[in-house]
Image (cartoon, rainbow, N blue to C red):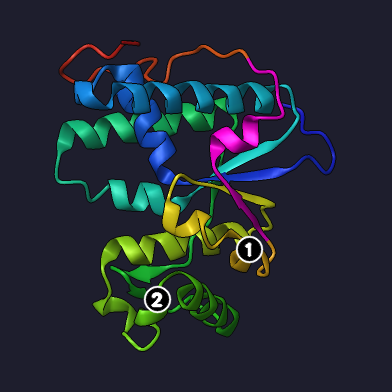
C-alpha cells in the first residue's frame, strides 16, 4: 500500500479490534450486537480510508502482548488472528515499552517515565504515588496504548473510553488528539465491507454474522 506523504497517523484503542473480530465471527452476546456491528462498520470504514492511502493506522504491540496471556484459548486465537489479518491489510504494530509483567522493564528511558507520569496524572491522578506494578492492569494498559502512540509520533488516538475522551484536551497537550472512531469518521463518506476472520480455523466456523 502506497502511503501519501504526511497522511494522518491514527492509533486505535484495542477494544476496536476486539469488537471488530467478535462481530465478524458472530461471537458476542445478542445484547451487544448493536455495539459490535457499529464498531465493525466503523473499523471497516477506517480500513477503506487506509487502503485509499488517506491515512496510516496502527495499534500498540501491547494488545498482542496482553492477548498472548488470555486465559480463553478460543478468544485468544480469534483476536490474534484478527490482528494478523489487520496487519496484512496494512495496519502497523506500534512498538511498546518493554515491561516485566506490568512493571517497567530495563528499556524504559527517563523520557518514558516522565511521559507516563504525566499521563497518569491526567487519567488517574489518585494513582500518581502508587507503584506501577501495584495498579490495576487495565489502568496500566490505558497509559501504555496512549504512551506508545505518542512516542511513535501518531497524530490521533481513537477510543470509546469515556475516561480518556473526557480528558482529550489535557492529553492533547502531550501532542496527540483524542476522539471516538465515529467522531473521526463523521467527515468522511465511507462504504465498508470485508471479513475480519478470513482464514480463521478455530473450532467454530468464523464468518460474518
Q: Residues within 10 Å of mark 1 (few under 14, many from 20)?
A: few
User: x, y percentage for residue 102?
Assistant: 31, 69
Q: Quadrant of the N terminus?
A: top right
Q: Position of residue 124 (x, y in %)?
A: 40, 73
User: Taking 134 as reference, is 169 left or right?
Assistant: right
| Front position among marks 2 and 1 | 1
Q: Is residue 101 magenta?
A: no
Residue occupying image coordinates x 45% and y 51%: 61
Q: Which residues fall within the magenta stretch?
A: 176-190
| Of the pair 9 and 42, the residue shown nearer to us | 42
SS for dot 1? helix
Report x, y in % for residue 86.
49, 30
Identify the residue at image location x=24%, y=37%.
76
Question: Is 158 left, or right, of 6 in this rendering?
Answer: left
Q: Nearer the viewer, residue 184 or 202?
A: 184
**Residue that label 1 marks:** 169
Is residue 145 visible in the rendered structure shown here? no
Residue of label 2: 105
Q: Residue at x 85, y 39 (%)?
A: 5
Crowd rating for badge 2 (residues with CA inside 10 Å; few <14, some 14–19, many 20+):
few
Q: Earlier in the sequence, mark 2 or mark 1?
A: 2
Amino acid at each position: 500500500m502506497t502511503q501519501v506523504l504526511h497522511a494522518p497517523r491514527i492509533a486505535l484503542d484495542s477494544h476496536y479490534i476486539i469488537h471488530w473480530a467478535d462481530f465478524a465471527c458472530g461471537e458476542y452476546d445478542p445484547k451487544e450486537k448493536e455495539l459490535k456491528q457499529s464498531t465493525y462498520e466503523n473499523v471497516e470504514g477506517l480500513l477503506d480510508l487506509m487502503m485509499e492511502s488517506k491515512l496510516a493506522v496502527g495499534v500498540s504491540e501491547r494488545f498482542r502482548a496482553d492477548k498472548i496471556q488470555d486465559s480463553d484459548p478460543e478468544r485468544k486465537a480469534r483476536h490474534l488472528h484478527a490482528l494478523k489479518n489487520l496487519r496484512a491489510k496494512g495496519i502497523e504494530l506500534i512498538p511498546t515499552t518493554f515491561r516485566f509483567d506490568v512493571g517497567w522493564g530495563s528499556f524504559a528511558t527517563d523520557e518514558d517515565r516522565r511521559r507516563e507520569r504525566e499521563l497518569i496524572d491526567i487519567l488517574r491522578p489518585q494513582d500518581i504515588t502508587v507503584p506501577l506494578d501495584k495498579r490495576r492492569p487495565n489502568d496500566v494498559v490505558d497509559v501504555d496504548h496512549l504512551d506508545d502512540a505518542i512516542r511513535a509520533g501518531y497524530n490521533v488516538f481513537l477510543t470509546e473510553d469515556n475516561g480518556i475522551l473526557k480528558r482529550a484536551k489535557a492529553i492533547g497537550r502531550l501532542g496527540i488528539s483524542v476522539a471516538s472512531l465515529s467522531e473521526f469518521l463523521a467527515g468522511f463518506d465511507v462504504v465498508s465491507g470485508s471479513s475480519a476472520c478470513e482464514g480463521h480455523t478455530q473450532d467454530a466456523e468464523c464468518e460474518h454474522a
